[in-house]
């Protein structure tokens, strides 16, 4: 295959990737977007294999690698529940970062195979690209592992604050820049691995101070990092498809992170520099005031919703944990059969990753036209009879709107407290992932339904039958 034909096929795959991103921007076209992305990747892989023209032994190893990796991926995809999708995404990001580091190492030790010079005489431009890709990839690797551990509950979701962490991070960053410069000048293998080690440490220290409530933005930003790492290695390899793919992932991830930062009233720069939200994170305050909670039952909730004309359902991570999306869809069907208007309200950072709630609702075949984002539905809460909040804690906390001293003050929330009645399903009165108390629990119009979200929803459906 000629290089001009390969370039054209890479361009075709790039266009398919762009169309895939376009398709993924809306639930109704997401399946088609996924198929276009898979087609684009298939074209890119086949083109690369044909263009490289490996020997039979090399080709066999590639096939074995693809079969092994693809098989493992297929098994994981089948076994992982939708509730664990955020940590799965974080784990996959770590693999992209690790791949960037390993490819860079291969290029350093065998430059002639990559067409970037000879051993001891690698082109300066290739060394710069290799060093940047390696640094970003290593940061992505360890940062994603920490994100995975926090999301999976294997590490505390609370910020882990090290003394003088900002000074340490700045020192590591300066050291990383210096080492990259030395690597470009000397092509030293020792310096290369020092770059890797410093970047690995920086990835850990950037993510451990980040609280669990801010993790959706972190996952999005790590996605962006993985894309830039891939793009950097794409320049080293001279692979147009990898450059296009990495740039698309990097830029789309950064744009999504910026949108989510606006949704949480956070600083985009602070995400990039690490320690996102850590300085303001705090545990729920104990002011010594005894608060009264109105606790209800499934029968109470069934009565209130049966006599309502409009019900808005607000899903959160509690729905994901209980896997209550199918029971929720059944509840909505019963309400609509009784001529009750039903809508779903989604906060942009509900759950543990962007679009988490949308995916779960789509899994339960909830009609897309019944699902609304925060800015489109917030004005309707004041005219709503009943709001059914199912585990969405921090994104409904009025303190974000009313209490300037709150760590989440300024974050846009779903203003469910403006409805006539708020039914809040939760296992306990404990604080959410942000670690602060929810004032909504104690408001006059709120009725707490304590228990498992799926079981409670099923009991409400049974009581309405």
Image (spheres, rainbow, N blue to C red):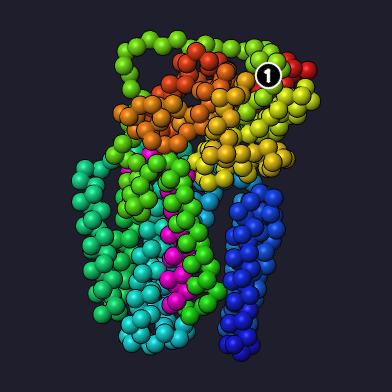
On the image, the x and y values in percent for residue 262 come to 43, 45
Identify whether 235 is placed above or below 204: below
Q: Quadrant of the C terminus?
A: top right
In the picture provided, is 329 more to the left or to the right than 203? Answer: right
| Residue 138 appears in the figure | yes
Regarding residue 83, the answer to whether it shows in the image is no
Residue 387, above or below 41 = above
Q: Position of residue 75 (x, y in %)?
A: 65, 53
Number of numbered discs overlaid on the protein picture: 1
Which residue is most to the bottom? 2
Q: Which residues are magenta?
A: 209-236
- Pointer 1: residues within 10 angstroms few (<14), some, or many (20+)? some
Who's the residue at 40% across and 69% down the image?
133
**Closest to the observer, 122 or 43:** 43
Residue under label 1, please give it.
Answer: 308
In the displayed structure image, the side of residue 148 where residue 355 appears, left or right = right
Q: Quadrant of the N terminus?
A: bottom right
Q: Is residue 191 magenta?
A: no
Percent of width and height locating residue 259: 47, 49
């Amino acid at each position: 295959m000629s290089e001009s034909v390969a370039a054209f096929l890479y361009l075709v795959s790039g266009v398919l990737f762009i169309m895939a991103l376009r398709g993924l921007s809306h639930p109704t076209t997401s399946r088609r977007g996924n198929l276009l992305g898979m087609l684009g990747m298939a074209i890119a892989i086949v083109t690369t294999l044909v263009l490289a023209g490996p020997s039979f032994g090399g080709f066999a190893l590639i096939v074995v690698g693809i079969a092994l990796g693809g098989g493992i991926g297929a098994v994981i995809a089948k076994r992982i529940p939708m509730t664990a999708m955020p940590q799965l995404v974080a784990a996959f990001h770590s693999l992209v970062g690790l791949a960037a580091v390993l490819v860079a190492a291969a290029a350093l030790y065998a430059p002639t195979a990559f067409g970037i010079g000879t051993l001891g005489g690698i082109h300066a431009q290739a060394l710069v690209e290799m060093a940047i890709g390696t640094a970003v990839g290593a940061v992505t690797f360890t940062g994603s592992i920490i994100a995975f551990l926090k999301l999976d509950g294997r590490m505390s979701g609370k910020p882990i604050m090290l003394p003088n962490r900002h000074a340490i991070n700045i020192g590591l960053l300066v050291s990383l820049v210096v080492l990259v410069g030395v690597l470009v000048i000397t092509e030293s293998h020792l310096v290369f691995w020092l770059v890797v080690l410093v970047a690995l440490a920086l990835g850990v220290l950037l993510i451990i101070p980040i609280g669990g409530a801010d993790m959706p933005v972190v996952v999005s930003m790590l996605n962006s990092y993985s894309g830039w790492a891939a793009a950097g290695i794409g320049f080293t390899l001279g692979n147009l498809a990898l450059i296009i793919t990495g740039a698309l992932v990097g830029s789309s991830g950064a744009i999504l992170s910026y949108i989510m930062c606006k949704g949480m009233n956070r600083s985009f720069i602070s995400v990039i520099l690490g320690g996102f939200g850590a300085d303001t994170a705090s545990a729920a305050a104990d002011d010594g005031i005894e608060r009264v909670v109105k606790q209800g039952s499934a029968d109470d909730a069934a009565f209130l919703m049966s006599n309502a004309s409009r019900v808005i359902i607000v899903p959160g991570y509690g729905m994901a944990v209980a896997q209550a999306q199918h029971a929720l869809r059944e509840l909505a069907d019963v309400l609509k059969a009784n001529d009750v208007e039903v809508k779903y309200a989604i906060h942009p950072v509900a759950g543990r990753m962007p679009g988490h709630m949308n995916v779960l609702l789509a899994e339960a075949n909830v009609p897309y036209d019944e699902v609304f984002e925060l800015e489109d539905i917030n004005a309707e809460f004041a005219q709503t009879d009943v709001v059914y909040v199912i585990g969405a804690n921090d994104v409904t906390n009025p303190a974000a709107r009313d209490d300037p001293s709150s760590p989440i003050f300024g974050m846009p929330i779903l203003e469910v407290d403006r409805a006539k009645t708020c039914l809040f399903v939760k296992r306990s009165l404990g604080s959410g992932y942000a670690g602060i108390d929810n004032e909504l629990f104690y408001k006059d119009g709120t009725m707490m339904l304590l228990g498992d979200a799926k079981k409670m929803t099923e009991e409400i459906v049974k009581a309405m039958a």
